Image: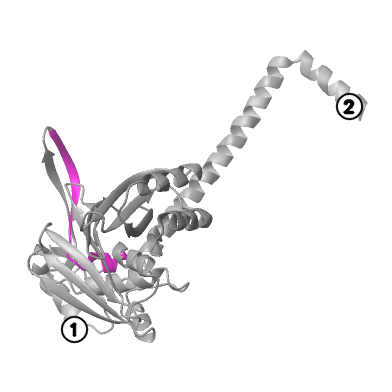
Amino acid sequence: MLEILRVALTSIRGNLFRAALTMLGVIIGVAAVITMLALGTGAQRAVEQQLAALGANVITVTTGMRFAQGVAREQQVLTTDDAASLREGARNVTAVSPEQNARQQVKLGNRNLNLSVIGTAPGHPAVNGYSMQAGRMFTAIAGSVPVQLDVEVSGEITEHDVSIWELSALKGLFTDVTEDPVTYVNAPLMAKERGCDSRLVTTATADDFRNVTTLVGTLADGTTVSVAGTLTGPKMVEKVVGVNGFDLEIPISDYMVFFSYVDRPGVIGAVGKLLGDADVNIAGMQVSRIDERGEALVALTVDSPIPEDVVAAIATEVGTETLRTVDLA
């Protein structure tokens, strides 16, 4: 074995250029194979995620050409009346969302872009499997499923059909309650099994925003919990605008913390120190209160989950039993 190694090293030293070219060819070949495998795997996962997002119970209907004697005559057209007919007449259909795609020139200030624009209807979130973040936040803040849930929708959006809001809220409500997949189909069944009645309440005007969605739930012990949210600005940023009667305006984040306490100096500093010692970075914070030195509510957004022992330390330091963490990641 040693003799073989000696001969091999002697041969390499005698032909360094050829050995270098050989090694380079092997390295490039192996790297090319690894790269192609990675690209193929990534593309496969992207397709799988797109199919999973559509779900196993989504049917897409598109238009086609009308043919006569094998010759294309005219493009068939689908209308919103067709969507309404499906919604009202088809059995076992939870939601219908008509869509139209077009290229449009969009201008903002000195920027001018040609973009793909999709026109759709309020049923779009249900068809694409989106759930209402407020539903998940409600469950986290309330700590349990309510016996009565009112989905209050206020603003100009109520000019359209917003019945899907109730289903979306229920889907979000049970997403973190059960390990079973929650869909727009089985969410009402889950609510019925758990004794949760729900109803949709609409109001044509909203006080402070164009549109506001508020979930108001009554728990088994009679406690009322409410969470309100909206979209604001050109980028349609999702924001929490109210919790349990306290006014807020804080962007929704993957990790959030809410707690109420008796307003007094030093609380915010103590909470910041505990989070800093735990290497948890505060991304945003807002304090809301109704009266000076009265009850106040703190809403925090953080960059990472807060360890349970830190949560307990904050609750003890603040003197609150209402500290709730929200994990939307």
Q: Quadrant of the C terminus?
A: bottom left
Question: Splitting the image into 4 quarters, where does residue 121 fall?
Answer: bottom left
Q: Secondary structure at mark 1?
A: helix
**Residue 119 within the segment the image draws in magenta:** yes
Residue 102 seen anywhere in this rendered image of the structure: yes
Name the element at disc 2.
Answer: helix
Q: Quadrant of residue 259?
A: bottom left
Q: Is residue 183 magenta?
A: no
Rounded to the nearest whole Å, what is the CA distance between mark 1 and mark 2? 82 Å
Please provide percent x and percent y for residue 78.
14, 68
Residue shown at the point (28%, 51%) measured from the top left: 287
Judging depth in this view, the residue of 89 and 173 nearest the camera is 173
Q: Which three-letter amino acid code belongs to the residue tagged 2?
A: Ile
Residue 93, placed above or below residue 267: below
Q: Is residue 151 left or right of residue 204?
A: right
Disc 1 crowd rating (10 Å Cα; few below 14, some 14-19, many 20+) is few
In the image, the segment drawn in magenta is: 111-132
Residue shown at 52%/45% (left/top)? 38
Q: Where is residue 41? Give x, y as percent.
A: 51, 50
Residue closest to the eye, 324 or 49: 324
Dot placed on the residue nearer the N-terminal end, 1 or 2: 2
Q: Nearer the viewer, residue 141 or 58?
A: 141
Residue plotted at (26% across, 58% down): 294
**Badge 1 is on which residue?**
89
Task: Give the answer, above or below, for where 271 lies relative to 85.
Answer: above
- Pinpoint residue 60: horizontal percent, then vertical percent: 28, 68
Q: Which residue is mark 2?
A: 4
Residue 5 appears left or right of 130: right
Q: Identify the residue shown where x is 36% and y is 79%.
A: 186
